Each structure stands twice: as C-alpha cells, then as structure tokens.
Amino acid sequence: METLLPIMIGTLFATGLYFILHRHLFKVILGLILFGLATNLFLFVIGGITRGSSAIISEDQKVAAEPYADPVTQALLLTAIVIGFGIQAFAIVLIRRVYQTFKSNNLDELRKENEEHH
Amino acid sequence: MRQVLETNVVSTQVGNWPAPYGITLVADMFSVLILLSGAIIGFAVYLYSLQGLDVTRRRFGYFPLLLLLQMGVSGVCLTGDLFNLYVWFEVILICCFAMLSLGGTKGQLEGTLKYVTINFIASGLLLTGIGIMYSLYGSLNLAELAVLVRQADHPNLPLLSMASIFFLVGFGIKSGIFPLFFWLPASYHTPPISISAFIAGLITKVGMYTLIRLFTLLFVSNSDFILPLLAVLSGLTMVIGVIGAAAQTDFKKILSFHIISQIGYMLMGLAIYTPLAIAGSIFFIVHNILVKTNLFLISGVVAQRHRTFSLKRLGGVYLLQPTLALLFLLSALSLAGTPPLSGFWGKLMLARAGLEAGKFTLVAVSLCVSLITLFSMTKIWNEVFWKPRPNTYKAETTMTPVNPQRLRMIYLPIVMLLVFILFIGIYASPLIRLSERAAAGLLHIENYTETVLSNKGTEQNRHKAQAHEVTSHP
C-alpha cells in the first residue's frame, strides 16, 4: 500500500497535467479533475497511513490509543475536496458556455476566432 | 489600525480554541497596511462602477461579488494559519472567476478559461506545499510553524526547501512572477474596466503579500538557497514585464504588462532581505495598489468616450478632456517614479537597500526598468493624449454624449485616489515610517508568535462567556 499510493499519485499528477495541456476542452476538464484528485490523495497520504483505530477517545482514557489515523489531515481533505468540487463545477459550466458561444471545443480555433474578432 | 499601532500585533481565536489548535486571526502592521489600501481602492471601484458599468452586469450580481472578493482579500491578510490561507485564496479565486466571466463576451470567456486552468494548478501546488509543511512539523498555525522552523536542527532541510518551492510556484503563478506570468496579460485586459481595475490592482499584490509573509516567517532557514533565486527571478520579472509593455499597442495591455514589472520590484525587496528593503517593498505594494487601479480607471474613462483601447485609434484626448489628461499624467509619473511622487520613494528605498547590501546588478536593472517604464508611459501619453485624432477613424469614434452629472460621478473616485497618491508622494514620511515598522515586525517575529501563542484574551473571553452563561440560565 505504501509503495502503491505514491506511484498512483504520480501517475494521476502526470495524466492530469497531460490532459490540462490538451487542446480539447473536454480533456481539459478531465485533466482538472484528475489533478484535483492527485492533490487530495497526496494530502491524504501525507498524514501517514495507519492501519489502526480512529482517533476516538474512550471514556477511561485521556488520549487516543496510540496507532490512530490523524484526524487533522482528514478534516483538511474534506474541505479541500469540497472546494475542489466547487471550482470543477465552475470550470465545467464555463467550458460549456465557451462551447455554446464559440461552437467549437478546440482551443486553437478559439484563439483564431478571437484574433479575427479584434 | 490604531490598536495595531499601539500593540504591534492583535490576534483573536475564533471559537475560543487556544492557538495552535483553533483558527487564528492575526493583524499586524503589514496586513493592516494592505487591508487599508485594499479598502480604499474597493471603495473607489465601487463608486466608479455605479456609473461606469453597464446595467446587465450590475443586475447579475456584480456588487455582491465585489464585496465577496473584498472579504476574501481581508481573510488572506488576517488569517493566522496555512490551511485557512488556502481557503481564503479559493474564496478570492472563485469571485475572480465569476467577475472575469461576468457578461460572457468571447474575449472574456477565453481569458477566464486560461485564468481558471492556471489558477487551479496553482491551488493544487499550494495544497501540496501545505501538506508537506504539515507532515514535517505537524502544525498549520503560522506562528507555531515559525517557532518550530527556527527550533528544529533541520534533519529535513531538503524537504523544507521543497515545500518552499511549492509555495513559491503556487503564489508565483497567482502574483505573476517571471516564468509564470503568461496568463496575466491574456486575461486581465478582457473584462470591463471596473472589474479589471479591481482585480489587477489588488489580487496580484495579495499573492505578493503572502509570499513576503511566508518567506519572512517560515522559509528563513534555507535563505542561502532561496534568496539568490528570488533575486534572479525579480530581475527577470522586471525586465520581461517592461519589455512586454513597451511592445504593446493597447492601453489596457500596456497596463497589464506593467503589473508584471512592478511585481518584480516587490520581489526585489524580498530578495535583498534587509529591513530597509522589505520596508521598501511594503511601501511599493501600497503605492502600486493605488496607482495601478487609478490608471486602469482612467483608461476606462478614455475608452468609455472613445469606445476603443487601441493606441492607434485614440488621440487628442488632451484637447477634449484636459482634466483627465492631467490626472493621467500625475498617476503615470508616479508609477514611473519621478521624484516628488509616490513611486519614487518606494524605488529610492529599494535602491538604497540594494546598494547597502551590495546587489549592484539588481539595482542597475531596476533603474533601467524605471527608465523603460517612463518610456512606455510617454508612449501612452503621446498616442492617447497628445497626438491629433486620427482622421480615418473619426467617423466611427464619435464621442458618446455624457451628461455632466454622470461624468462627475466617474471622475470622483479617480480624483479621490489621486489625492491619496499625491498625499503619500509629497508627505511620504508617515507611510515610510509605518512600512519600516511593518518590516521590523516581519523580521523580528517574537512579538507575532508570542501574541498568537500566548492566547492573550482567550482566557478572559472564556470566563466572560461562562459568566454570561450562568447569568442567562438562572
């Protein structure tokens, strides 16, 4: 698991960036989503993967039993996922709007048309 | 502000959780200065857009967005921990996205698309950097991190450098330093002027604010490696930005490229890293927020009457609107840094600090860039205000009739900003003293960390809250 996850994160980052650099708008969306996933996964792994209990303190103890998963990263992750969703949703709406206005989902044509427009 | 003047640092714990665990809000001299200038230009842009923006855009939630953006900026300036910094940046970003695409013309959509993509990547890198910092030190509170970074005997210095590079790239994209600025001129000139004035005036400087804050607070221990890098980057940013500006023939695009070269100056202060240099940077940021917004607003007034931003089509504005020409001249000269005006003091402080620190190349580059800035401002002056109106376009650029009441409303914020600019230019010593104090606060962090970590006030508040509970539930 510990070796698999970093490899997966790396692959996600790479594919995400590759898709973002693509000229088709749909693939740009895919790239944004994959990139967001990669960062979230990274944030998750950085907290340390523990195969143990959750950080719930039982009544007779003062601190949680020792091998516990760090709740802070999970809280951060939750926020980051929500924010990421928001921005991805905005990007999807924006790209749909671009498609409607330009009648094309190719970034190159978009620029050409814009230059003619000027 | 007065409270900050008295006690240097003010902090509060949201929800009364003690410092390293809860959410902290901190205000010190630096953040207060940025907040104040941000509020001033926010007010000016608000006044301007009452008359200067079309009705449809105002109906589609322009003013709420403007206020939300202002809230995001305040959040970034006041926040006391890394993750909230990220969250506030997302607040800013989503408002920027919406404002840039508001109205949905073709150019705007294309510009917004670039802006969204590049800023999404920047946020991802930022989050990665935050993750690394958390895994290294197990804390997100800026003050506690600062203490930890200084205490640790650095077994993991390479990782810290890696985190600092992540932050540098993330905020570098947001503030537009050298290799990462390409999205800025592509998207800033597309929306209507009151929107781009606010975004261009404030948002890149907020990125710069966080860079200065984090690099003085957290990444000091590896400064042998990071400061020369910053120096090179700042020199390149200045030169490339100003060359780009000199090559453009569009009023708004020249101004957009100038943002980049001015970011170079702010970075220069951080790269020299002496109290005087950082004070110079802070002065420069405050001055630049005001001047840049004012120049954008003036270009908006010109374009509103002539319906174009292209330098080739404009001309003779001096004869038609002499007041506007005067306003432009004063702002442009203070941007370029002619002596009695505000830009001069910032540059003087930076240059003196550079000479004292022995960074002669950087100072020479910055002075040359000043000259080219002056040149490109003269270019705008010549083309827009001085040269006779081009005959070929005369028919289509008939001036739109404006009633004097509306015109006065549009001039009001510009004059107001200019008064501020002239004030900090001619009567510069208070602001210089304030920014020196801010710089001292940034370099000597004991005050900052103590105020945040000692939870002053928290205990009292809790007692008060308990007392209140007791009285309210008899």
Image (spheres, rainbow, N blue to C red):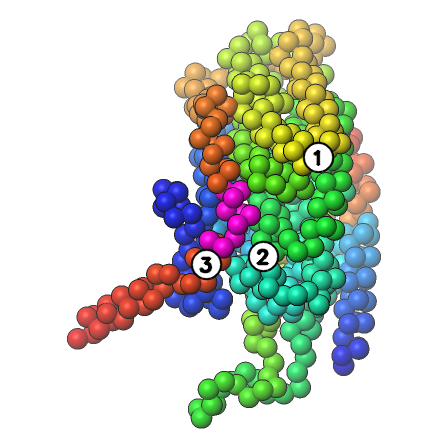
Q: Which residues lie in the magenta part?
A: B438-447
The dot on residue B86 is: 2
Q: Of the residues tagged 2 and 1, which is closer to the observer?
A: 1
Q: What amino acid type should be assigned to the residue bearing mark 1?
A: Gly
* Pointer 2 chain: B
Q: Give, as a three-letter code, the residue at label 3.
A: Glu
Q: Earlier in the sequence, mark 2 or mark 1?
A: 2
**Label 1 to label 3: alpha-carbon separation:** 34 Å
- Residue B169 x, y percent position in the rendering: 71, 51
Q: Tell me the chain of label 3.
A: B
Circles 3 and 2 on the same subunit: yes
Q: Which residue was labeled with disc 3?
A: B450
- Quick check: marks 1 and 3 in contact, CB under 8 Å? no
Residue positioned 79% across, 77% down in the render: A4
Which residue has dot 1 on it? B358
**Dot 2 amino acid type:** Tyr
Who is closer to the viewer here, B215 or A21? B215
- Which of labels 3 and 2 is toward the front? 3
The secondary element bearing badge 3 is classed as: helix
Q: Is residue A74 visible?
A: yes
Give neighbour class at mark 2: few <14, some 14-19, many 20+ (Cα, 10 Å). many
Between the residue at mark 3 and the residue at mark 2, the CA separation in whole angstroms equals: 24 Å
Q: Note whether A64 is above or below A92 in the view shown.
A: below
The C terminus of chain B lies in which quarter of the figure? bottom left
Residue occupying image coordinates x 61% and y 68%: B137
